[in-house]
Image (spheres, rainbow, N blue to C red):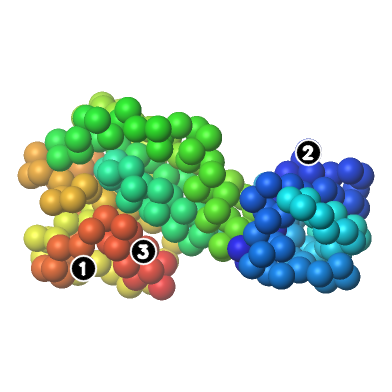
Amino acid sequence: MNLILLFDDDFIDAQRVRLGGRRAAYVQAVHRAAVGDRLRVGRLNGRVGTGVVTALGENELLMEEIVLDRDPPPPAPATLLLALPRPKGLRRVVQGVAAMGLKRIVLINSWRVEKSFWASPALAAAALREQLLLGLEQGADTVLPTVDLRPRFKPFVEDEAPALIEGSRALLAHPPATLACPHAVPGAVTLAIGPEGGFIPYEVELLCAHGFEAVSLGSRPLRVEHAVPALLGRILG
């Protein structure tokens, strides 16, 4: 936790907060905070700053002198279109993408995505929010990303993707592609990443027909949770 996120209902008044649950336990057990320590904080969807620990109790922490005087880091200029991975991998990816500063994730279907994944509790709004918040804490950010679910591949690509990629360079991660994934792409990027095994040829053709360029990191197949940070790290430079 590189930033303690503060929510509206944490505030006693403008400069005092009371934390409980996971955040209070983490600050005491991992940060080993003591009374008088000044910690880095940020208000959800707001500014960042510091606060001073004034009291510690079992599963509770009080802070005063809350000063929020800086903007959060600028968002990464990228949108991720991701074929829905298995639930365990989804949690890691969502958390990691939030830490990297992306503000929109669109989870899409693919022929190789198991139908049961769409019924997973990991897709519940509360479960996704939990992973996004953990990512924000890691990335010292406050602005909550959005996660959209699009379980119908063809209608999404044909009806929504053209508007979504407008004004950005649309890249499709496809290992057999002959074009190498570009490095430090200027401007906005929309990145599409398929499931384990990649998009099938029909899906690749449809995406490319609607504005995507197929690019590759090389011939070695990567798991989705490894491919996402590798591609974003290269594209964002």
Q: Nearer the viewer, mark 3 or mark 1?
A: 3
Q: Is residue 45 above or below residue 154?
A: below
Q: Amino acid at mark 2?
A: Asp
Report which residue position mark 3 lands on: 229
Asked which secondary structure carries label 2, the reply is helix
Closer to the N terminus: mark 2 or mark 3?
A: 2
Badge number at residue 64: none
Q: Which residue is mark 1?
A: 217
**Type of the residue with mark 1:** Leu
Q: Residue 137: image x %, image y %?
A: 60, 58
- Alpha carbon distance from label 3 to label 1: 12 Å
Q: Amino acid at mark 3?
A: Pro
Q: Is mark 2 in CB contact (under 8 Å) with mark 3?
A: no
Tag shown at residue 9: 2
> What is the CA distance from the residue labelled 2 to the residue labelled 3?
33 Å
* Placement of the C terminus among the 4 image quadrants: bottom left
* Residue found at x 84% / y 44%: 11
Which residue is located at x 38 percent, y 69 percent?
233
Dot 1 alpha-carbon crowd within 10 angstroms: few under 14, some 14 to 19, many 20 or more = many
Tell me the quadrant of the picture where the N terminus can be found. Answer: bottom right
- The residue carrying pointer 3 sits among few (fewer than 14), some (14 to 19) or many (20 or more) residues within 10 Å by Cα, namely some
| Closer-to-camera residue (172/99) | 99
What residue is shown at x 47% (from left), y 45% (from top)? 104
State how far apart marks 1 and 2 are (Cα).
45 Å
Q: What is the quadrant of residue 224 in the picture?
A: bottom left
